[in-house]
Image: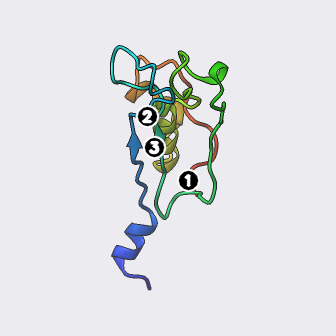
Amino acid sequence: MPRLPYLLLFAAVALPVSLGAQLVDQYNPPPSSCCQASAAMLLGGAVAGGRVIADWPGLSNGALYEGRDLKPTTDLDALIAGALGQHYAIEPSRVMTTLFPEGQARAFSQPLIA
């Protein structure tokens, strides 16, 4: 029989998130130092992993957000609500409206948790 720490590790989920990014056009900085793009990784034994879920709009001038940043393609609130809902067997849309009541996005629906 496996030991308890091993079982807890198997069921664990971690979601580190980066809320900032480098500007694509360093010579045309925005009035503030905030950027739009970010990154998130879903880690742990309970994760249905082995893949990258992303849309890549490219780096052409027409694909950049406000002509200077990587364009956000996935709402982090939706990813967080989807992962928590799936991990704790709660309807992800309920998690979304509870955690992010002013959010406009729908909870992430792709399978994230095994």
Q: Quadrant of residue 13?
A: bottom left
Count of numbered tags:
3
Residue at image coords 51%, 18%: 104
Whichever of callouts 2 and 1 sits on the residue coming sooner in the sequence is: 2
Between residues 74 and 84, which one lies in front from this camera angle? 74
Whichever of callouts 2 and 3 sits on the residue coming sooner in the sequence is: 2
**What is the image's colouring?**
rainbow
Q: Circle 3: is it few (<14), some (14-19), or many (20+) Cα within 10 Å?
A: many
Asked whether, in this view, residue 13 is left or right of residue 53, the answer is: left
Q: Which residue is mark 2?
A: 22
Between residues 82 and 41, which one lies in front from this camera angle? 41
Residue at image coords 65%, 36%: 55
Q: Of the residues shown, which amino acid type is indicated by label 2?
A: Gln
Residue at image coords 43%, 35%: 21
Find residue 10 and report its horizontal and vertical position in percent: 45, 68
Q: Which mark is residue 113?
A: 1
Asked whether, in this view, residue 41 is left or right of residue 57, the answer is: left
Q: Which residue is mark 3?
A: 84
Q: Quick one: SS at disc 1?
A: loop
Find residue 7 and report its horizontal and vertical position in percent: 41, 72
Find residue 34 and report its horizontal and vertical position in percent: 36, 24
C-alpha gap between disc 2 and disc 3: 28 Å
Q: Of the residues shown, which amino acid type is indicated by label 1?
A: Ile
Quadrant in the picture for the C terminus: bottom right
Q: Quick one: SS at disc 2?
A: loop
Between residues 111 and 17, which one lies in front from this camera angle? 17
Quadrant in the picture for the N terminus: bottom left
